[in-house]
Amino acid sequence: MRRSDLSGPSSPTPASPPAPATAPAPATAPRQRAGGGRSPSPAPLPDEAEATVSRSSLKVRPAQDQPSRRRSSGATATGVSRWRSLLGLRQTEDDTQAVRRHDRRPATSSGRSTRRRPELPTITLPRVQIPSAITQTGARLLDLTGDRIKPLAERSAPVWRPVARTLGWVSPLGWTVLALGLVAWVLASRYEWTELAMIAVACLVLFLACVALAIGHAKVEIRTDVDPTRVIVGDPATGRIEVRNLSGRGMLPLLVELPVGRSAARFTLPSLGSGKSHEELFVVPTERRGVIQVGPATTVHGDPLGLVRRTMEWTEQTELFVHPMTTSLEPLGAGLLRDLEGQVTPDLSMSDLAFHALREYQPGDDRRYIHWRSTAKHGRLLVRQFLDTRRSHLAVVVDTTPEVYTGEDAAVELAISCAASLAVRSILDEQDTTVVCHDQQISRATAPLTLDTFARASVGPVDIFGSAGDGAALAPDASVAILVTGSHRPFIQVQRALAQFEVEVIKVALVIDPDAQVGVRHAGGLTILTVRELADLRRVLFSGALA
């Protein structure tokens, strides 16, 4: 029992001061009087209050309410930010918010300040650079050693080149067999393993036998012919290879390889006696436009397993030109009239520079061309008649970018065929012709050489502005400029490309579009011809589009 319970009822005492927020006093049940009334609880003594606070402070709090946890996490976030500032890294927004959240801690009872400490300044570490003196010295040493080693290598070439050529005979499989034999030999001699010794002997004997088969030298004469050397796409082309034995004794069967384009033809020749020859025929595929390299013919000496392989070249390379398909066109008849440097045409004219003949005056003739001496001599009016003179130079530029065509590669080949047809017709009309097709250029050449240029041209992205500039530079006296392109090329780019030619030049854009309607139209100072196939080119030119 407490002392307060023994005492009688007393006046209510003032309420005790509230306990600190950090240690709230536990709620106790109110005491009831004997009469059923509720009596106020007596004020606790100082010792009792301290005891109550100490007991309440012994309760375990959750982890999120413990100040020590908050302080440790805040210190960790602040430490990370300091390390990032030291390393020169940028602090993320999440880390900044975390630091601010942990810095907002309430003041403790000890009165310790929770103000955020100032961050350390950012340190920028310079890059490690090699001094220029070291780099310059290294470059000089390389130059000096290179200048000295190169003459030494050239002087010692008769010694090391045959050795390097001989080592090149051995294939990777041959080096593997040789290495296996040597390793098995070393292990067998060390561990006295009979099976390894047998493997070593087998590998080494096989390798030496293959080398002996490759040492032989054949005295033969090989000739290769391709007829014809210029064909159109799809035309047949055949080749012939002839091998003659020039040695005084018979020759064992021999393997001859002949590269044809990207593939290679292999011929196994039979045994040939002294002075005998053998001939083989082969077919060259010509399904695609291009230049096919035939040769050089090589003989292969070696073993059937392919451990050692020695090749010898006997012929030179032969080029087979596969020209694009062309169509026959009517004479273009385009050019600049009345030019002093132009060529005389069979067309009669009443106002040109090449005098042709005299004829009787007809109503409407220009009186300036009346030849008065002949008129007085014959007693009737006679006028001079002339022949047209034209300066005709056709410049053809081909856009080989597949993305601007509908159908890509097939449409590019159609564009090249149209350009080749125009160039051949211009050359047949005895006009100067300039062609710019991707990486190939030619000017004022014959028809076969011009078609060879089209055959060499590759398909790929091209700058039409630069190509047209090259054409204008090669043909400064051009009278007609034609740009062959696709329907997806913007018109402004075509107009800018052709604008590099002179003002008096007839500018034509030949558009390849299999989905459009064939026709001729004029726009922006250009004549636009639209074709769907090669046969449509004759139709659009028949309307006099280049006149």
Image (cartoon, grey):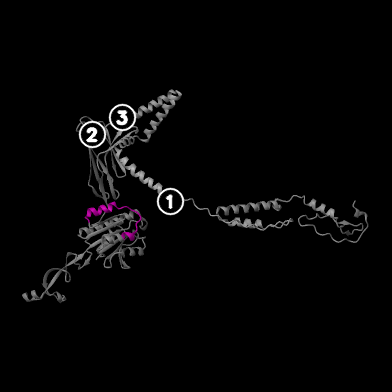
Label 2 SS: loop
The reply to whether residue 531 is visible in this rendering is no
Mark 3 sits on what residue?
A: 212
- Mark 3 and mark 1 in contact? Answer it, CB < 8 Å: no
Q: Which one is earlier in the sequence, the residue at label 2 or at label 3?
A: 3
Q: Residue 191 carries which label?
A: none
Q: Which one is earlier in the sequence, the residue at label 3 or at label 1?
A: 1
Instruction: Look at 35% across and 29% down and name the residue there.
Output: 207
Quarter of the image where one finds residue 426:
bottom left
Instruction: Look at 84% across and 59% down and name the residue there.
Output: 16
Instruction: Look at 35% across and 28% down and name the residue there.
Output: 206
Label 1 SS: helix
Q: Which mark is residue 132?
A: 1
Foreground tag (3 vs 1): 1
In the rendered structure, which amino acid carries the disc numbered 1? Ser
Instruction: Look at 13% across and 72% down and name the residue there.
Output: 384
As drawn, is 284 to the left or to the right of 370? right
* Gap in angstroms between the C-alphas marked 2 and 3: 17 Å
Q: How crowded is mark 2: few (under 14 residues within 10 Å), some or many (20 or more)?
A: few
Q: Is residue 279 magenta?
A: no
In this orientation, which residue lies closer to the viewer: 253 or 331? 253
In this orientation, which residue lies closer to the viewer: 517 or 459? 459
Mark 2 sits on what residue?
A: 219
Q: Which one is earlier in the sequence, the residue at label 1 or at label 2?
A: 1
In the rendered structure, which amino acid carries the disc numbered 3? Ala
* Gap in angstroms between the C-alphas marked 3 and 1: 56 Å
**Which stretch appears magenta?**
445-468
Residue 213, placed above or below residue 445 = above
Question: Which x, y percent locates residue 234?
Answer: 27, 49
